[in-house]
Image (spheres, rainbow, N blue to C red):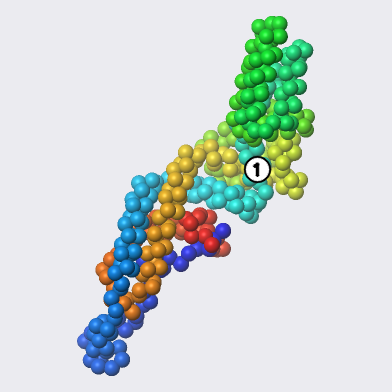
Amino acid sequence: MNNTPDTSTSISPTPHDATKDVPWWNRNVIGEDSLVDELFGKLSKPEVSESAKFLHNREMTDVLVFAKTAQAIDNEKFGKEEFLIFVKMKYLLGRDLNEYAGLYRSLQLLKVAIEAKDSFISIDQTELRYRGTKQQEFYQLVENLLKDHENKEAFRQQLQESLADLLPQVKTEEGKTALQSYAKHLDKLSESELGLQLLSLFKTYQLADYSILRIISEMIQNLGKSDLQDFKSLMALVVVNYSVFEKLRQIIGLAERQSNPETYTLMIQFIALSNRHAISYLKFDELIKVMRKWFKPYHAIISIRLEHPPTEYKQPKEFQEPIPGIEIYEKYQKWLTDKKTGMSYIDFGDEN
């Protein structure tokens, strides 16, 4: 978390001199702040060193490259209120702040569970329908693997090896097909370690009613083009289906104190926003990465200019040039800074 930077130094770091506002014909010829005093001041000021000018121009070249890339990525979609809300939520979740503290892992588990609902349901239906000796042997093997596997790659390899050994021992073609489908869904789940963790948790807590995932998934899908900023309306949906969410509490590792309609609504809102803005956010994240590279030469330029103010040095004209990319930096700092608290929901690399 960072406070809003003082960008007043970004364009004109020089202190304001009130005497320069006085027309030259109204100023004294001699004496303090006179025309002669100013003339001698200019003549007596040292030049900015060649090394400082070299460094300044080198950083300006670098900042221009990053600014052009950022301008090419920047999109008016990033300025929409709903998208900015999603950006703020991502920031708070990633830093474990405010009402999102402690929610990141639970939210990721819920999101994966919803996305993999079809695999969970198929796995469950296969286990219930096909109860032959060899099938049950395979189910037990899978359960053991879930409890004891090094990583998802090892799980997948052991799964395929076990299937290859067991499949010829299954008598019917239907039984073989069922086990192959079962293994296919397990392999799909294992694309994410979270998927395997979820299946293990479902079995640990003996929650066999995977249809609750379909209920939550349909709830999110039915939001369609709904106003996802309307928190009260979203919470009304959660309240109606509250018993469904409560069944998932232990599975997704949600603390008992967090198990309330407000928390589940935050989670549903985030998942719905993620579904709606996932592609745009990838581009926005790309913009932020470029701006973090931009910030280093930008900061160097400001430092050089502050070290050589026009009150003390003869300013080369390049020291007065605007810094490319500053408009993007200031735009998002403004949009993503809370006016009341001063909290900024974006990190361009300027956080302390």
For residue 237, say whether it is visible.
no
Residue 224: give x, y in percent of width and height. Answer: 53, 35
Task: Please give left or right for residue 20 compared with residue 127 in the image.
Answer: left
Which residue is located at x 53 percent, y 47 percent? Answer: 86
Q: What residue does disc 1 label?
A: 105
Q: Is residue 193 above or below residue 262?
A: above
Which residue is located at x 61 percent, y 20 percent? Answer: 184
Q: How many marks?
A: 1
Judging depth in this view, the residue of 190 and 82 nearest the camera is 190
- At mark 1, the secondary structure is helix
- Label 1 Cα crowd, 10 Å radius (few <14 / some 14-19 / many 20+): some
Q: Is residue 321 above or below residue 192?
A: below
Residue 308: give x, y in percent of width and height. Answer: 35, 74
Q: Return the residue found at the far front.
A: 51
- Split into 4 quadrants, where in the image is the N terminus? bottom right
Judging depth in this view, the residue of 313 and 240 nearest the camera is 313
Judging depth in this view, the residue of 212 and 303 nearest the camera is 303
On the image, which quarter does residue 46 sit in?
bottom left
Which residue is located at x 31 percent, y 57 percent? Answer: 61
For residue 220, say whether it is visible.
yes
Residue 146: give x, y in percent of width and height. Answer: 71, 29
Q: Return the residue found at the far bottom.
A: 31
- Split into 4 quadrants, where in the image is the C terminus? bottom right
Task: Please give left or right for residue 31 compared with residue 332 in the image.
Answer: left
Task: Please give left or right for residue 253 compared with residue 40 in the image.
Answer: right
- The amino acid type, in three-letter code, at marker 1 is Arg
Which residue is located at x 73 percent, y 33 percent? Answer: 201
Q: Return the residue found at the far top.
A: 172
Residue 176: give x, y in percent of width and height. Answer: 66, 11
